[in-house]
Image: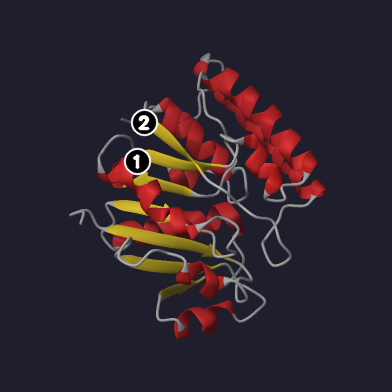
Amino acid sequence: MSDKKIIAVLPAYNAAKTLKLTLDDIPEGSVDEIILVDDCSQDNTVEVAKQLGIKVIVHEKNKGYGGNQKTCYREALKSGADIAIMIHPDHQYNPKLVPQMLKPLIDEECDAVFGSRMIYKKDALAGGMPKWKFAANIFLTSLENILLGTKLAEYHSGFRAYSKKALETLPLEENSDNFVFDTEIIVQLVANDFKIKEIPINTKYFKDASNVGLKQGMKYGTDILRTMGKYKLHQWGIKKRSQFKKVT
């Protein structure tokens, strides 16, 4: 057993149908506490979560995916987390892999662990990833690796775990409340020389899983390119941004 306190955070929106499946697949004893943050769901996610006996935080109005994560990490730190692992309650990512996600952080090998669907690319397609999303993932990740000098297999997975140090150090509140939050936090990790480790994961696309459509995906891609541009201008000293300031 680890002496580190591990808290699973679940950013939820309309997850009533898949929440129990997700919780049932988290290996017993792998986390010390589970916190669900409901982003003003239109279904009975909150009622289901309370019936299942986990801690629930409810947004009075929808704050977006990034805004939900900000609450998740604030609440995890308030509850004394040494490690926070984000598990999407739509059951798209495999919660059975939580111990593998946590091990590098428990062993203090890194400050962030990402579950990557693209280490074994054929598995992403086998899991039902749309081909347009598969191609966009490869293109954007390649571009981000070039601009940030990294060698990540994927920038766009939502299965992630962070150390307390990373969460307390990075200016997360300056990030977007939308999907591009996931990219911005990677830029901040790189800017502050935090070590990132990836593990291969499987995923599945199905009717009740939350999926980004083509139109929303195009906006996400544009936001990523804009973020990369902002960071390079900051890095070159042309337009400094406190969001990407080195703070470690």
Q: Residues within 10 Å of mark 2 (few under 14, many from 20)?
A: some
Location of the N terminus (image quadrant): bottom left
Badge 1 amino acid: Ala
Task: Where is residue 95? Give x, y as percent.
Answer: 48, 59
Give me the residue at 78% from left, 41% from top: 131
Cβ atoms at labels 1 and 2 below 8 Å apart: yes
Q: Which residue is mark 1?
A: 166
Work out whether 237 lies above or below 154.
above
Residue at x 35%, y 41% (from the top left corner): 166
Mark 2, residue position: 194
Residue 169 image offset from top left, x and y in percent: 33, 40
Please report the residue visible at 56 percent of the width from the left and 34 percent of the height from the top. Answer: 119
Left or right placement of residue 224 versus residue 7 in this view: right
Q: Quadrant of residue 80?
A: bottom left
On screen, residue 223 versus residue 192, left or right, reads right
Mark 2, secondary structure of its residue: loop
Can residue 120 be spotted in the picture? Answer: yes
User: How far apart are the alpha carbons under marks 1 and 2?
Assistant: 8 Å
Q: Position of residue 102 (x, y in %)?
A: 35, 49
The amino acid pointed to by label 2 is Phe
Q: Which corner quadrant of the image does residue 93 belong to?
A: bottom right
* Residue at image point 61% right, 42% down: 180
The mark nearer the N terminus, 1 or 2, is 1
| 7 left or right of 57 in image | left
